Image: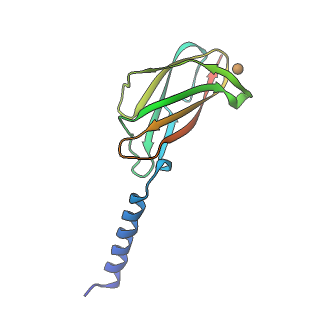
Amino acid sequence: MLSSTRIAALAATLSLATTAAIAGAADYTFEPVTPEMKKGDDVILTVRLTNKQTGKPVADAVIFKTRIDMAPDGMADMESPVAPLPSKEPGTYAFKTDLPMAGRYQVTLSAKVQGEPETVTAKVIVKATK
Ligand SMILES: [Cu+2]
């Protein structure tokens, strides 16, 4: 016979399994590795992709769209060139860009994560200083 504690534990396990099954793009987050850097040309900007449920970095994602602009400071049309660089650490993704003036830059990313059918999109804010 199952005790009520066992049943509660079983129910909790089942609901966890259900949550994992319906996991989606919202379970992933991009964060800047260095949220603040010196302005200039050929700046290396690195973001980390994390699975929020496990807290672990997510390697081998394919970032297929990247845009960097100054939208946070009202300059959405001030767009910077972006070139992907090889990753130095699993779960981090690096780009070469220009941050020509001090202020806040928005990095808009679209990525395909292994095993996740939905596209993961994110907006990351970084700050360039003088
Ligand atoms: Cu600007």
Q: Is residue 43 above or below residue 7?
A: above
Residue at 40% x, 46% y is 116
Residue 93 percent coordinates (x, y): 43, 29
Residue 35 percent coordinates (x, y): 56, 30
Residue 107 percent coordinates (x, y): 57, 30
Q: Quadrant of residue 73?
A: top right
Instruction: Check the image and tell me how it is coloured.
Output: rainbow
Q: Which image quarter holds the C terminus? A: top right
Residue at 62% x, 22% y is 128
Residue 106 percent coordinates (x, y): 62, 30
Query: In the image shown, does 84 or 117 lie closer to the viewer?
Result: 117
Count of marks overlaid on the render: 0
Query: In the image shown, does 58 or 3 lie closer to the viewer?
Result: 58
Q: Which image quarter holds the N terminus? A: bottom left
Residue extending furthest toward the front: 117
Query: In the image shown, does 98 or 66 lie closer to the viewer?
Result: 66
Residue extending furthest toward the left: 1
Query: In the image shown, does 36 or 40 lie closer to the viewer?
Result: 40
Residue at 64% x, 25% y is 69
- In which quadrant of this rendering is ligand 1 seen? top right
Q: Quadrant of residue 20?
A: bottom left
Q: Quadrant of residue 71?
A: top right
Q: Is residue 78 above or below residue 121?
A: above
Residue extending furthest toward the top: 41
Residue extending furthest toward the bottom: 1
